[in-house]
Image (cartoon, rainbow, N blue to C red):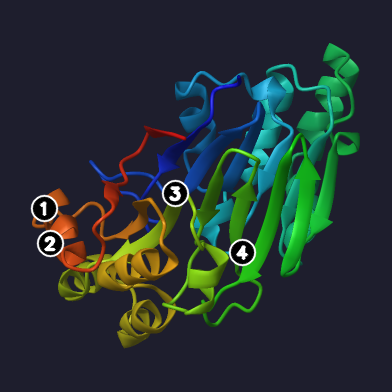
Amino acid sequence: MAENYVALLGTKGGPAIRPGSSMPTANLFCINGLQMVVDCGLGVTKGLVDQGMQLKDISLIFISHLHSDHYLELGPLIHTAWTAGLKTQVDIYGPVGIKTYWDGFLASMKADIDLRIADEGRPDLRTLVRMHDIDAGPVMERGGVTVTAMRTVHPPLIDCFAFSFKSAATHVVFSGDTAPIAALEDFARGADLLIHEAMLESALPALTKRVGNGSEKLMEHLLRSHSPADAAARTAANAGVKRLALCHLIPSDDPDYGIDDWHSAVAGYFDGTLIVGTDGVRIDL
């Protein structure tokens, strides 16, 4: 039987990186022999290589929404895979607008792509990628894995999705970015693993101060568009999931807050197995 696991490649909430910080959101789901990349924040390419993945084997990518910490490195990932030997179809599933990003990336790299085709004999990268706009409901079925999307609450964006990955043997749900919503409980009902974003409310004032170039709007966004850790835990408990992995951590790089704070925030709300995400951690399914 093929090895089934999820690797959290990047577990930081938000796009900024600083010395010593973790990397933004990216994941590798390996189920039934399918290797599926879920979100492509900065660092996804190295994260995949560090997991031992051959980039030329990339074939499936899912993007949850169009915030930069979830798709900034999509183009560079595919281009790097191409230089590493990619010659087969890549299917990318994401919100309306993802094709505009891809077309813009291709335009920005036209000189390099054309040169490598002519000078190195590579296949045309532009013919290898197939884009799929998604909506709530069925997304894809392949190799015994069914992928379904659910719209989340992450204002001001409308097209923001959670994903369910279900096979005969396992069920994994990725929350994407979302405020607490009851609908996610049904979406994740009985899952073997729920990967859910989380923030520590007590750490937010220090975070917004450290950012330095925002206004009170940043705090307003965090509070209306993301889930406190205790809310993520309640969702997991109400959904009856077996394991909860906290990711998209806000903050993930403040030395005044660590793993004990995340465990304390969840204590009393979820009594299953808790995993506080760190970059590169592999969760067996």
Callout 4 secondary element: loop
Q: Is mark 3 on a helix, strand or loop?
A: strand
Question: In the image, 192: left or right of 163?
Answer: left
CA–CA distance between discs 2 and 4?
Answer: 32 Å
Badge 1, how many Cα within 10 Å: few under 14, some, many 20+?
few
- Mark yes or no: residue 14 visible: no
| Amino acid under disc 1 | Asp
Q: Along the horizontal axis of the image, is 155 left or right of 166?
A: left
Q: Is label 2 in contact with label 1 (beta carbons under 8 Å)?
A: yes
**Residue for point 65% across, 42% down:** 167
The quadrant of the rendering that contains the N terminus is: top right
* Mark 2 lies on residue: 264
What is the CA distance from the residue labelled 4 to the residue labelled 1? 32 Å
Sequence-first tag of 2 and 4: 4
Mark 2 or 4, which is nearer the eye? 2
Is label 1 in a helix, a strand or a loop?
Answer: helix
Query: Taking 18 as reference, is 28 left or right?
Result: right
Taking depth in this image into account, of 274 and 132 the one nearest to the observer is: 274
Q: Pointer 4: what residue? A: 66
Image location of residue 59, percent across then percent down: 74, 33
Q: Residue 260 bears which disc, if any?
A: 1
Mark 2 residue type: Ser
- Pointer 4 local density, CA inside 10 Å: few below 14, some 14–19, many at least 20: many
Q: Residue at x 81, y 39 (%)?
A: 110
Residue type marked 4: Leu
Q: In which quarter of the image is residue 56?
A: top right
Q: Earlier in the sequence, mark 4 or mark 1?
A: 4
Nearer the viewer's eye, disc 4 or disc 1? 1
- Rendering coords of residue 228 (x, y %): 29, 72
